[in-house]
């Protein structure tokens, strides 16, 4: 497994492509505007959901509050619902959308810089996270200005978590190599222009060595608390470290379950509209 990753890492085409991207992850110590958690009540057509917005993801917290106060969430549909995965809402074009219309492309506000605080915040059942465009067009993993999802997920066995943990560690190694390529972008471009294959190979070897050194301590991805949560209540661990988790459901997971259980069309939109009637800050 390890050898396969390194074969991918040292490919020249991958080296050049990765030099043009960057993955942004933060630790809690880097959050200069961290403050108080905030509660928001979502009154939906099938019941109330109370969510907590984390103070240590201040950009997402403050943006969500701004969207609530602007009325952006009043009338939006839960436009994407996938059993054992999540329920998604926040597309402004879903308001009064005709039956059968494909939704999910709309947004309010502007993209938000990532605040991926992992493993402090992870995708357990009931986690609130920001939707976003894929890495191929959004390598910085910026979040949508308004769309978000609530995790439902499923429960995992210890063996399944072990396998997912290894896959996540491989992705982390790729991200570390990615960032090193960004830092050496000018050198890579100069070597390419000069057709210096020997120099490129030497740089590749150097970056692979640095990647191995930086990731040498990645022996346990999931904490005991996380493993317990994924086995006992479930979630979507394969999304960890790649999407910003900025809150959680405090009350109303039974309502989320009603939404999750709704019958959907080929585009995962519920056949019978389920909407946020109103949203308000309650703390």
Image: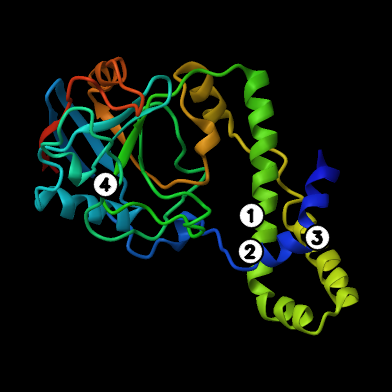
In this rendering, the label closer to the viewer, 4 or 1: 1
Percent of width and height locating residue 227: 56, 26
Label 3, label 4: how far apart the Cα atoms are: 40 Å
The answer to whether the residues at label 3 and label 4 have Cβ atoms under 8 Å apart is no
Residue 175, label in figure: 1
Q: Position of residue 148 (x, y in %)?
A: 31, 41
Above/below status of 212 relative to 44: below
At x 47% / y 38%, what residue is drawn? 122
Q: Quadrant of the C terminus?
A: top left
Name the secondary structure under disc 1: helix
N-term mark: 4 or 1: 4
Secondary structure beneath disc 2?
A: helix
Observer-nearest of 264 and 28: 264
Task: Judge left or right: residue 269 versus residue 185.
Answer: left
Q: Residue at x 78, y 64 (%)?
A: 12
Residue 77 lies in quadrant: top left
Residue at 69% over, 75% down: 184
- Residue 238 position in % (x across, y down): 55, 34
Q: CA distance from mark 4 to mark 1?
A: 30 Å
Q: Which residue is mark 3?
A: 208
- Residue pointed to by mark 4: 37
Earlier in the chain: of badge 2 and badge 3, it is 2
Other residues around mark 2 within 10 Å, as few (<14) / some (14–19) / many (≥20): some
Q: Are marks 3 and 1 in contact (CB under 8 Å)?
A: no
- Circle 1: is it few (<14), some (14-19), or many (20+) Cα within 10 Å? some
Mark before the other along the chain sequence, 4 or 2:
4
């Amino acid at each position: 497994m390890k050898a396969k990753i390194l074969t991918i890492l040292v490919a020249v085409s991958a080296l050049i492509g990765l030099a043009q991207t960057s993955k942004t992850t933060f630790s809690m110590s880097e959050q200069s505007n961290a403050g108080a958690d905030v509660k928001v009540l979502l009154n939906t057509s099938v019941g109330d959901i109370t969510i907590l917005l984390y103070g240590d993801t201040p950009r997402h917290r403050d943006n969500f509050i701004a969207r609530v106060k602007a009325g952006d969430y009043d009338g939006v549909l839960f436009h994407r619902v996938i059993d054992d995965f999540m329920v998604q809402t926040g597309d402004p074009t879903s308001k009064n959308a005709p039956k059968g219309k494909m939704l999910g492309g709309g947004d309010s506000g502007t993209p938000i810089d990532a605040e991926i605080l992992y493993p402090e915040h992870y995708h357990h059942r009931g986690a609130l996270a920001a939707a976003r465009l894929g890495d191929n067009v959004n390598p910085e993993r910026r979040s949508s200005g308004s769309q978000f999802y609530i995790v439902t997920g499923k429960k995992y066995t210890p063996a399944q978590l072990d396998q997912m943990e290894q896959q996540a560690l491989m992705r982390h190694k790729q991200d570390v190599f990615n960032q090193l390529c960004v830092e050496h972008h000018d050198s890579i471009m100069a070597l390419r222009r000069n057709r210096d294959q020997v120099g490129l190979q030497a740089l590749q070897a150097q970056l692979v060595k640095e990647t191995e050194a930086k990731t040498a301590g990645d022996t346990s991805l999931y904490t005991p608390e996380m493993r317990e949560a994924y086995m006992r209540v479930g979630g979507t661990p394969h999304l960890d470290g790649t999407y910003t988790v900025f809150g959680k459901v405090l009350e109303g997971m039974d309502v989320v379950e009603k939404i999750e259980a709704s019958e959907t069309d080929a585009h995962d939109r519920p056949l019978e509209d389920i909407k946020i009637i109103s949203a308000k800050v309650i703390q």
